[in-house]
Amino acid sequence: MSEQIGILIAEDQGMMRSALASLLELEDDLRVVEQVARGDEVIAAAERVRPDVVLLDIELPGRSGLDLIDELLRAVPGVRVVVVTTFGRPGYLRRAMAAGASGFLVKDDPVEQLARAIRDVMAGGIVVDPALSARALASGPDPLSEREREVLVRGADGATIADIAAALHLSESTVRNYLSAAIGKLGARNRGEALSIARRNGWA
């Protein structure tokens, strides 16, 4: 038997995580070496078990999967990251690939396709859900700067301008400028609508 590929699964839904692990373990050349349910547990787990591939959900408690990719690649040199998510949004795909992910698949795909993708990225390939790739090409680039996105997201739960400014160590006028720019770029009427548009496209 060829050497097994060690896999870390980061997925917050217990039933999905267990099912995925069980199905991947049926493949002779794949071995699940660790499972975590929170984004803020991923880096420590990866440093401990040194997986070959990390299967990473996006919406994890504690920390977004998208924010982990770059740090994962630095913490475990040579590791491949494959994003596996319910949220097949073009903006998420762009951000994941820009951060260094080797693959981006949606959870609707059959597990055989995921197993094939793991082997492909281990061989140096890039694997992206084809329908999502086509949508990303059609949707155009993310119009938001990193700061504009951060300010929009910080205001998601009704935070005031003062709250956002304090959290990000910015002046209130700077926060207003970022929000105004984001609202204008997205053609929105207010920051709530801007955030909704950004999330729908995977830009926030």
Image (spheres, grey):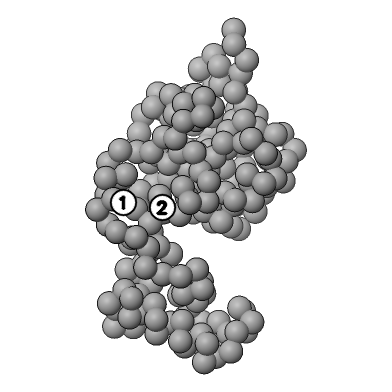
Residue 84 position by quadrant: top left
Residue at 34% in and 38% down: 129
Callout 2 amino acid: Arg
* Residue 82 relative to residue 2: left or right: left
Residue at 32% in and 44% down: 133
Callout 1 amino acid: Ala
- The x and y percentages for residue 155 are 48, 78
- Residue assigned mark 1: 136
* Residue 10 relative to residue 156: left or right: right
- The x and y percentages for residue 58 are 49, 51
Indicate which disc residue 94 carries. Answer: 2
Q: Are marks 1 and 2 in contact (CB under 8 Å)?
A: yes
Nearer to us in this view, 87 or 177: 177
- The x and y percentages for residue 49 are 71, 34
Residue at 50% in and 76% down: 151
- The x and y percentages for residue 6 are 62, 27
Q: Residue furthest right?
A: 48
